[in-house]
Amino acid sequence: MQVFISESAFWGILVSAIEVYRKESYGLLLGHKDRDMFMVVNAVACQKAERHTTWVRARERSHARIVNFFENLPNLYIIGDFHSHPRREINLSEEDIESMRPDAVYIVAEIRDKAKDKYWSYNEDGTISGTTDNWFIKIAGFYLDPESGKPKMADVLCPFAIGFSIKPKRTSTA
């Protein structure tokens, strides 16, 4: 299984994780699912989520309003969700696994303080990772295997991000 992340979705996931750094971010993934690929077109942060350093929970009423809104739009579907793991690895927690549904994709963004610059690249485990101005971020995709019902990692594809490097802007001294 593969997860294709568009430029817009990539930015949505990164900005959401950076904005609430030290607490978990949460949002919905919009797009389409083909036989062997999830196409993530957009990642929409849920602003009213209840956040902690090791967990995040959607607030029922606001989450229901958002889901209802997207369910009424043509040609765009909620295909899963994303959240961040600040200062922790991308491994799924028991709560993450319990909340997974068949035919959905789940993206986890590990975010921590940057130790050194790293261009965005594909990793052997199917993830992508790189640095921004102050952060190291690693993105993984998960889904429930239809045969075993157990979580599996998908290969993340994000051509926009590969080779990308965000460096602080130089200020003009003139």
Image (cartoon, rainbow, N blue to C red):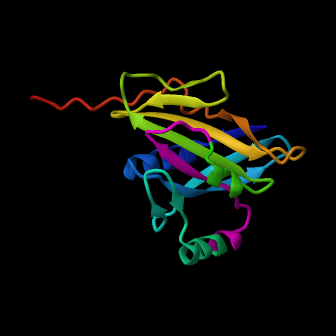
| Image quarter of the N terminus | top right
Residue 44 in sight: no
Look at the image and give the residue range highlighted in magenta: 69-91
Closest to the observer, 81 or 172: 81
Looking at the image, residue 162 lies above or below residue 85: above
Residue for point 63% across, 54% down: 95
Of all residues shown, which one is farthest toward the right? 147
Where is residue 163 shown, x and y percent of the image? 51, 23
Of all residues shown, which one is farthest toward the left? 174
Residue for point 65% across, 56% down: 30
Where is residue 60 shown, x and y percent of the image? 58, 74
Looking at the image, residue 168 lies above or below residue 151: above
Residue 153 lies left or right of residue 165; in this view the side is right
Residue for point 65% across, 50% down: 94
71 in magenta: yes
| Image quarter of the C terminus | top left
